[in-house]
Amino acid sequence: TYPAVTRFVISGTHVVPRTYVTSRDPLVAADIQRREERCRRAGGIGTAVVLIQCGGISQVMPVEVDPPSKITWDAREDWADVLTHFVASGRTDFKPISTTARG
């Protein structure tokens, strides 16, 4: 038999203040702050906090963002449409197409 495959669909996204997450749990707030400080000491631009909710369960994912010199910057006018298309169609193979020499 084949294993069951569960597919999740993104039903929406929101930008909320960081305090939405940090004001509710001091341990989570401390972890985010620790990652923020570590990231900045290493030259990064900070920590993005992603909150994933599925039913009554939520997961906080602090993501340390690399220094600008290590990020392949790209200018595309259609990035929002491309990302929306991949999310709407449930595709998991989205990879940004880079037009810079750094790949």
Image: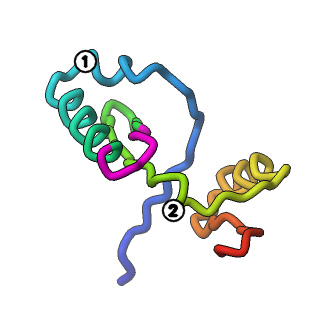
- Which mark is first along the chain, 1 or 2? 1
Where 14 falls versus 87 (above or below)?
above
Query: Disc 2 on helix, strand or loop?
Result: helix
- In percent of the image, x 83 and y 52: which residue is there? 78
Residue 2 left/right relative to 94 = left
Where 102 falls versus 58 (above or below)?
below
Q: Furthest-left residue in view?
A: 27
Which range of residues does the magenta coloring cover? 41-48
Q: Quadrant of residue 6?
A: bottom left
Position of residue 62 measured from the top left corner of the image (x, y, whole percent): 34, 42
The residue tagged 2 is 70
- In percent of the image, x 39 and y 50: which residue is there? 43
Viewer-side residue, 3 vs 26? 26
Amino acid marked by disc 1: Arg
Q: Is residue 92 magenta?
A: no
Residue 73 left/right relative to 7 = right
3D distance between C-alphas at marks 2 and 1: 33 Å
The residue tagged 1 is 24
Position of residue 31 measured from the top left corner of the image (x, y, whole percent): 20, 37
Amino acid marked by disc 2: Lys
